[in-house]
Image: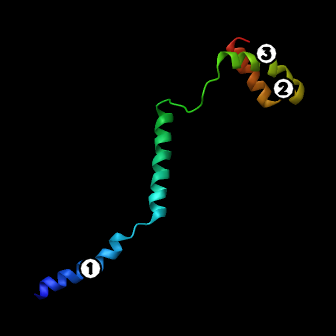
Amino acid sequence: MKVGSTFALIAMLGTPAVAQVDPATVGLSQVLRAQNEGYADRARGRTATARPSPSRVKYLCTQRLPSFRAQYGADNADVVELAGLCRRAGY
């Protein structure tokens, strides 16, 4: 009888501690899992960036690049990068 009541008492005292779940820990684990999946995707060569359509590339390189050069200057880092991308695309 004493063994049974001791076991029941220990079981009742341990239950509230086990039943508590920290939402911050659960949320953090979800964030870290998503972050690690992103690392794995990048390691496999997958990227989340969308590629512009050929008509959009043509518009940017023929219409917008000259206006960007005039507005920001030919030595602006973004303009230089866009010009290089346009050269690579054949414009």
Amino acid type indicated by mark 2 = Phe
Mark 3 element type: helix
Q: Residue at x 59, y 31 (%)?
A: 49
User: Which quarter of the figure has residue 77?
Assistant: top right
Q: Which mark is nearer the camera, 1 or 2?
A: 1
Q: Is residue 25 left or right of residue 82?
A: left
Q: Is residue 76 left or right of residue 16?
A: right
Q: Earlier in the sequence, mark 2 or mark 3?
A: 3
Mark 1: few, some, or many residues within 10 Å (few <14, many ≥20)?
few
User: Which quarter of the figure has residue 53?
Assistant: top right
Location of mark 1 (residue): 12
Q: Quadrant of the C terminus?
A: top right
Q: Residue at x 77, y 30 (%)?
A: 78
Amino acid type indicated by mark 3 = Thr
Q: Earlier in the sequence, mark 1 or mark 2?
A: 1
Location of mark 2 (residue): 68
Residue 71: % across, % down = 88, 28
For the residues labelled 1 and 3, the Cα–Cα distance comes to 75 Å
Q: Residue at x 35, y 74 (%)?
A: 17
**Badges 2 and 3: C-beta atoms under 8 Å apart?**
no
Mark 2 element type: helix
Amino acid type indicated by mark 1 = Met
Check the image and report above or below for 2 versus 89.
Answer: below
For the residues labelled 1 and 2, the Cα–Cα distance comes to 72 Å
Location of mark 3 (residue): 62
User: Quick one: which residue is furthest to the top in this view?
Assistant: 90
Check the image and report above or below for 29 versus 81.
Answer: below
